[in-house]
Amino acid sequence: MTAASMKPVSRRIAGLLAIGLGCALAISSASAAYPERPVTLVVTFEAGGASDVSARVVAKALSEVLKQPVIVQNQPGAGGRIGTRRVAGAEPDGYTLLWGSGSTLTAAPALYPDDKYLATLMPVGVGALQPFLFVTTPATGAKTVAELVALAKQKPGQLNFASAGIGSSNHLLGEIFMSATGTKFTHVPYKGAAPARDAMIRGDAQLMDEVTATLLPQINAGQLVPLLTTSQTRDSELPGVPTAAEAGLPDLAITGFFGVMAPPKMSPELLATLSDAMKKALQSPELKKSFASMRLDVGSGSAEDLAALIARGRERYSKIVAERKIRVD
């Protein structure tokens, strides 16, 4: 090839390189500019609950990191599945995110296997951890898991287990408890944790599990007796209460959680940007103070940790749903 004939080729290559460089710079610029407008954080439960309140704390901290408003939108219904489905169908541009709970991300897939959209959501980061606490009533006379198990085996089916509703996380945890201990309680579902707790105080039920914050006032008042916590370590305010592992029930070591999830097919670069923003937001002193008042442990902000929590919860809940033949209408 002559020098003259090489010139057009060189010009074409130079042109292609210029185009490629321009595209790369455009992509880099777009990534660097995110976010250019407010971000929506979808909460799948009603305002006022733990999911909603914790989301607003995180949204405020994220707004400060991202330099754009992060607006919480409540979209309740169908046990959280309506709002979750909305995010699963959103554009993967980082402007519609989900404040997902352990209930919607781990229990729901076990109970509604046809909801394939859940598997498409992408983890951004763990925001908060919320262990469960198993309690009984003073009337049972039981102060330990072993004592309550012994009583339940003496009266199979005669003791009641209260939950916040069929298919809720605490319902499934109760089923795991019965399976692991070989006991038979009669499950009585209520419309929420508060009515279930009130039933315990009245003596209508003898076992329930809920997040610690919901039960601590009644424990301190002597109305409920703590048996075990599902966390990895003992609760600092209940140092005498064993963990599930210490009580010989490792299958109950399932911690409730909240975390940010993104729509499917989001770019790795944008996911990394959001995860980094989460980690920074969770370092906020104001956030830490708010979470402490809500009895929430601050999460790691890690996408990998969130993925591991989801996988572990789905595995255990799917197993108990199949074993106990649990169905929801």
Image (tube, helix red, strand yellow):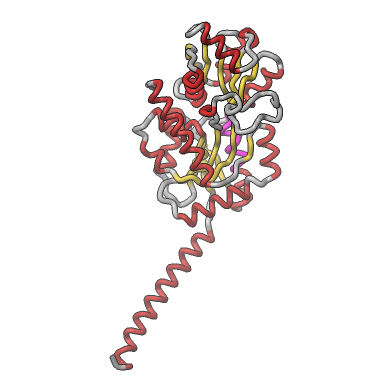
Image: magenta residue range: 48-59
Which x, y percent locates residue 89?
39, 43
Residue under the point 46% across and 66% down: 26
- Is 28 located above or below residue 206 in the figure? below
**Front residue (pair 62, 221):** 221
In which quadrant will I find the N terminus? bottom left
Mark count: 0
Query: Picture coordinates of residue 278 (x, y %)?
Result: 58, 48
Is 220 situated left or right of 316 in this image?
right
Q: Is residue 254 left or right of residue 240?
A: left
> What residue is at 59 percent from the left and 24 percent from the top?
247
Does 52 lie within the magenta span? Answer: yes
- Residue in the image at 55% along x and 37% along y: 258
Identify the image quadrant of residue 81: top left
Place residue 327 in its image quadrant.
top left
For the point 53% across and 60% down, the residue is: 33
Q: Is residue 191 visible?
A: no
Q: Is residue 1 above or below residue 186?
A: below
| Place of residue 293 in the rendered image (x, y in percent of width and height, measured from the top left) | 69, 32
**Residue 180, x across and y down, in percent:** 49, 21
Q: Nearer the viewer, residue 42 or 153?
A: 153
**Does residue 22 sit above or below 173 in this rendering?**
below
Which quarter of the rendering shows the C terminus? Answer: top left
The answer to whether residue 203 is visible is: yes
Q: Main secondary structure of the magenta part?
A: helix
Q: Would you say residue 54 sits in the magenta stretch?
A: yes
Residue 192's place in the image compared with 205, above or below, is below
